[in-house]
Image (cartoon, rainbow, N blue to C red):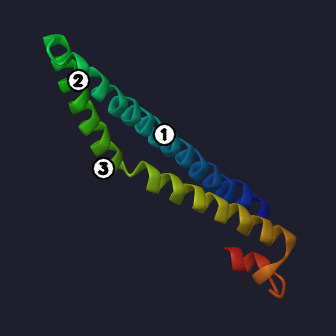
Amino acid sequence: MDIQQYITERVDGQTSWYSAKSRSNKTNYTRTKVALTIIAAVIPALTAYIGDEVFKTLIAILSVAMAVLANISTIFNFKDNWTKYRNMSEILKSEKNIFLAGAGKYTDAANPEQVVC
């Protein structure tokens, strides 16, 4: 495998994968937090109508939904995964650019391809 093929198939492929996973986790984190915020804001407003059975039921359902969303966010670690995947994607991009520029640890290497592979 030559270096261009390695960069195209391995480095670019992994960078794309990490970027996609980062985006997915960011989207899930953001959606979960927005939903939790809306539910948390609506529940106190609904307590003004606590005498009505429909609102009692709605408050109970929203409270359960809030607990479920909070635990889903914790179980799947959307925020941590988002930042870890983004960080790895940026590290790969940076390392690729350093290699292509012949800088850093690739400057004095007799065979820079050996340092990569």
Q: Specify which label sits upstream in the sequence, 1 or 2.
A: 1
Residue 38: image location, x then y, percent: 40, 30
Please name the residue that numbered disc 2 is placed on.
Answer: 47
View extreme (right): residue: 101
Residue 107: image location, x then y, percent: 84, 83
Q: Is residue 110 above or below residue 78?
A: below
Instruction: From the viewer's perspective, tell me whether residue 56 is left or right of residue 109.
Output: left
Q: Count residues near mark 1 (Cα–Cα under 10 Å), then give few for <14, some for 14-19, many for 20+.
A: some
Q: Count residues near mark 3 (Cα–Cα under 10 Å), then give few for <14, some for 14-19, many for 20+.
A: few
Location of the C terminus by quadrant is bottom right
Tag of residue 8: none
Q: Give the image quarter of residue 58.
A: top left
Residue 98: image location, x then y, percent: 79, 71
Tag of residue 75: 3
Tag of residue 30: 1
The kind of residue on which mark 1 rests is: Thr
Q: Residue at x 31, y 42 (%)?
A: 70
